Amino acid sequence: MPATVVDAVQLPLPCACRCHETLTLDERAAGIEALYRFDDAMRGWGQTVIWDLAAPTLWRLQQQLGDVKWVAVRDNGCIHSRLLGFCVHELIHAMCGDPSKPNYGTPVGLPYGVPEHVSPTEEAAYLHPFNQHEARAWVGLAPVAHRLFGIEWTLLPARDVGTYGFAGGNSLCDVPEGYRKVPHYDHHQHPRRYDSLARKLEDEAREWFTPDKLGEIAAKFEDAERHGRAKRPAAYPAPREMARLKPKKPGRNDLCLCGSMRKWKQCCGALVEV
């Protein structure tokens, strides 16, 4: 069975951010309450959040399977900065698309490929809306987290840079069946060009988060949250009780927490930054 939000908060892991030490008990409780509310909203939209430490692997599997309503949010041991940041990032993506559809209506082959029917001359235009949404999800962590959850500490994004598909370079990545690889600018091979294009997108994205837009996001979120909360499979533990739990790292030879039946050191333990 996939891990649940309760599994994630009941077994806190050490993290490089040292959240358990740097955040107050009230802040940690607010963070856990925010994770509960995110889980409710996604359930309200018909999505299944998977809380295992396996987001990259699950994303690749989702690309292969196609139309599945999975939201994999965890690739790191950190809960209050990285995981919560990942969740807010996903919320913004959902708000930019149709949250009731698989991958919020975005084709799973993006941003490094396009459907085969898209001509090479139309690749950049086809990818642009995805890039816009990614930029909003990248720069919107702080305003959205504050508006929805009252969070004021720094949230960390899922990756070091935004995942954009800028057509025109020479980098190629594997894409699912039915898609064509798009030669693109990669942030490792073309850092200056990539950063320049990303900066322009992100500057435009910041202007999207007006007070009215944040109010609209909050209304949609709270409506989905109400529906999802009514469908909780069981009562969730009190956030404050979970916030008191001290991080504990599994033994290297213990079974992994994700249920893979592999050793921790050979499975999710390799993904946890400490």
Image (cartoon, helix red, strand yellow):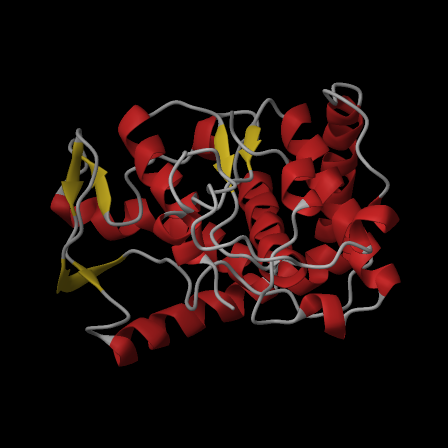
Between 36 and 41, the residue placed more toward the observer is: 36
Q: Quadrant of residue 38 in the image?
A: top right
Q: How many marks?
A: 0
Q: Residue at x 40, y 36 (%)?
A: 106
* 189 lies left or right of 60: left
Q: Quadrant of residue 175 in the image?
A: top left
Q: Residue at x 21, y 46 (%)?
A: 122
Q: Where is 28 relative to 126, above or below? A: below
Residue furthest to the bottom: 192
Between 115 and 75, the residue placed more toward the observer is: 75
* 146 lies left or right of 97: right
* 105 lies left or right of 244: left
* Residue 48 showing in the rendered view: yes
Q: Where is 54 relative to 14, above or below? A: above
Q: Residue at x 64, y 38 (%)?
A: 7
Q: Quadrant of residue 85 in the image?
A: bottom right
* 230 lies left or right of 186: right
Q: Where is 61 relative to 249, above or below? A: above
Q: Position of residue 15 (x, y in %)?
A: 58, 65
Between 220 and 69, the residue placed more toward the observer is: 69
Q: Position of residue 52 (x, y in %)?
A: 51, 40
Q: Position of residue 210 (x, y in %)?
A: 71, 59
* Residue 210 showing in the rendered view: no
Q: Position of residue 142 (x, y in %)?
A: 68, 64
